[in-house]
Image (cartoon, rainbow, N blue to C red):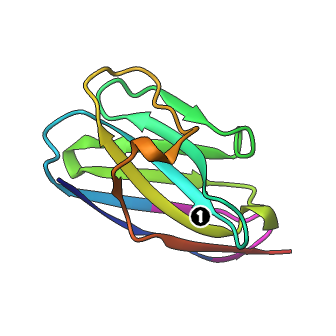
Amino acid sequence: QVMLVDSGGGSVQAGGSLRLSCIASGDTHRSRCMAWFRQAPGKEREGVASIHTAGGHTYYADSVEGRATISRDNAKNALYLQLDSLKPEDTGMYYCAAYTRSWPGICDIASEDVYPYWGQGTQVTVSS
């Protein structure tokens, strides 16, 4: 069992930046895929970025490619998402998610169904 706590959201103007954080606790000794998903009002939740805790390979959705940086600090069991050049369409609830996987390759974010562990979400609001 892995527990996740998200934080770092807020309200910013377009062009601004935010850094989201996620702290994992519980069974954190095994390698895992970790990802950020977001859900805009009236839309389905979508994957934003992912990283494997051992391999470090990252993957980004086209919508944030070049504006987002996902990183992790295994010593702190922490996951981060740096969002720059924010746009109003980045507005939504952002969720940290994880699943245990030993293979250190790229972690898929096409389906949220493979992620059993979720944070409570942190709201990001970008005004124009």
Return the residue found at the far front. 113
Main SS, magenta residues: strand
The residue at 13%/48% (across/down) is 27
Mark 1 is on which residue type? Leu
Between 94 and 1, the one lying in front of the other is 1
Residue 54 image point, x, y percent: 29, 28
25 over 14 or under it: above or below: above
Q: Is residue 1 left or right of residue 94?
A: left
65 over 77 or under it: above or below: above
Determine the secondary structure under disc 1: strand
Residue 99 image point, x, y percent: 32, 42
Q: Is residue 20 left or right of residue 93?
A: left
The residue at 17%/53% (across/down) is 1
- Residue 59 found in image quarter: top right
What residue is shown with label 1? 18
Return the residue found at the far right. 128
Q: Is residue 48 left or right of residue 128?
A: left
Which portion, as a residue range, is magenta?
11-20
Residue 26 image point, x, y percent: 13, 56
The residue at 79%/63% (across/down) is 89
**Picture quarter with the C terminus:** bottom right
Q: Is residue 42 magenta?
A: no
Q: Is residue 19 left or right of residue 4?
A: right
- Residue 57 found in image quarter: top left
Residue 58 image point, x, y percent: 50, 31
How many labels, in total? Answer: 1
The residue at 40%/52% (across/down) is 97
Crowd band around label 1 with a 10 angstrom C-alpha radius: few (<14), some (14–19), many (20+): some
